[in-house]
Amino acid sequence: MPSDEEQRVVLFNTAAEKMFGCAASEAMGAAIERFIPPRFRSEHRAHIRRYGQSGVTNRSMGTLGALRALRTNGAEFPIEASISQVEADGSKFFTVIIRDISERRRAEESVRESEERFRLVANTAPVMIWMSGTDKLCNYFNQPWLDFTGRSIEAELGNGWAEGVHAEDLNRCLDTYTQAFDRRESFKMQYRLRRHDGEYRWLLDIGVPRFSKDGSFDGYIGCCMDVTDSKVAEEALASMGRKLIEAHEDERTWIGRELHDDIIQRLALLAIELERRTQRLPDSAGQGRDQIYQLVPRLADITRDIQALSHRLHSSKLEYLGIVAAAESFCKELSEQQKVVIEFSHSGIPRTVPKEISLCLFRVLQEAAQNAIKHSGARQFKVELRGGPEEIQLTVSDWGVGFDEQDTIKHQGIGLVSMTERLQLVNGQLSIISKPGHGTTINARVHFNPQQDRLSAAG
Ligand SMILES: Nc1ncnc2c1ncn2[C@@H]1O[C@H](COP(=O)(O)OP(=O)(O)O)[C@@H](O)[C@H]1O
Ligand SMILES: [Mg+2]
């Protein structure tokens, strides 16, 4: 907006018309002061006078953002301005370049407001919140975090927070964070953090990457909850589960032994006795003798069934010959009894497998095979035992009707649950691959390192 020495407008462009809500025809020749709020006018006048005398050709006006202008409708707005002066034909002309910064101000204001709101929400939320930047270093902790650790924000910033993490958890914790960070993936981890009173508490920390509107990566935000109480309850439950399974196994062992060592022996003796006595009956007994004679094979059938039952309850083969022999013999007995084909194979299973692992795998095999027979509709199954350098895997597959795991959760069958729980007790995992119409594969994996376990057993 150029003006003459008397501070009258000599040119008024369309941008200026729009900005001030004033037609050029009306502005031309008018005092420039009409675009300045009254309370700034005298200051402005003095300023221009000093500037005119200074001889400086170009400079910005006022401190940034402190300048205000006036629209024709009386509304004030923030501006940024710079002024320059030229002399032509002995008279001075000033040109002021004005930029309306209301929009920018509004944006800054709304950022400030939203930051304030975020801080208010973050500090009143009942969880601990942290944020980190693109350099992995933490640049924010909310009040609940600071209240928990009892430390100052300065102490926690950067990597300071790591000082409060339990020494046994720190490396795992940093690994999880770094790996997730490098892949920009969310993560979930549990670690112990020192509370203000010195007690270490278990935290569940969930972190997710932050992206700005244009999609660029900004760092991470995470929230933590104190899960010590539920962790203690979980451990108590797990130990309860272990005790239940152990009690169950003891009971099975006892009944299995009782059947095998006592009932089966007595039945066998009874069969012999019956046969002997029948033979001794006089020929005159005739038909009656034949009828009693026919009871002998029926007694043998019952004995065989009880024997199979005793093996199911307690496999002495498992105890004395190991998982491979026990699994093979179980598959053979089951296929004969149920008239199905079970293809058994094994490789790389070490000679000695800890009792709890072999018993767990044996029970999973029993349940999975019984399920395949009972539910799949198929008559042919595959059982595989594979040992690797670090683990043992058991796979039971059928090509039957399959099922949807989600549906069975509602039915609450005890078989799948008990397989999962048994495996958890030996730090193993159960995975089920099944789809209606596409058969089922049950895979049980247990971590087992023969070398390491032998060393630790010896040491
Ligand atoms: N091999 C399989 N083929 C088809 N369905 C299966 C198979 N294994 C399990 N299921 C389904 O999963 C359910 C839960 O199994 P489980 O927990 O062992 O309970 P249960 O055998 O007592 O029904 C079964 O009722 C069945 O619907
Ligand atoms: Mg079952």
Image (cartoon, rainbow, N blue to C red):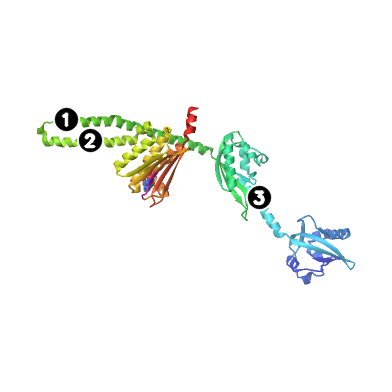
Label located before the other in sequence (1 or 2): 1
Residue 277's disc number: 1
User: Residue 51, position in %: x, y?
Assistant: 86, 59
Pick out the residue farthest to the bottom.
Answer: 25
Q: Amino acid at mark 1?
A: Arg
Q: Residue furthest front?
A: 347
Along the polypeptide, which appears first: circle 2 or circle 3?
Answer: 3
Q: Residues within 10 Å of mark 1 (few under 14, many from 20)?
A: few
Depth check: give the residue in front, 447 or 204: 447
Q: Amino acid at mark 3?
A: Glu
Residue at disc 2, secondary structure: helix
**Does 185 sit left or right of 295 as displayed?**
right
Q: Are marks 2 and 3 in contact (CB under 8 Å)?
A: no
Q: Is the residue marked by circle 3 packed among few (<14), some (14-19), or many (20+) residues within 10 Å?
A: few
Measured Cα–Cα span from mark 2 to mark 3:
86 Å
In the picture, measured across the screen, residue 298 lies left or right of residue 215, that is: left
Quick check: is 397 in the magenta stretch? Answer: yes
Q: Position of residue 458 (x, y in %)?
A: 48, 27
Q: Position of residue 157 (x, y in %)?
A: 66, 42
Q: Is 79 above or below relative to 136?
A: below
> The magenta stretch spans which residues?
396-400
The residue that mark 2 highlights is: 299
Q: Nearer the viewer, mark 3 or mark 1?
A: 1
Residue 127 seen in the current view: no
| Residue at which label 3 appears | 116
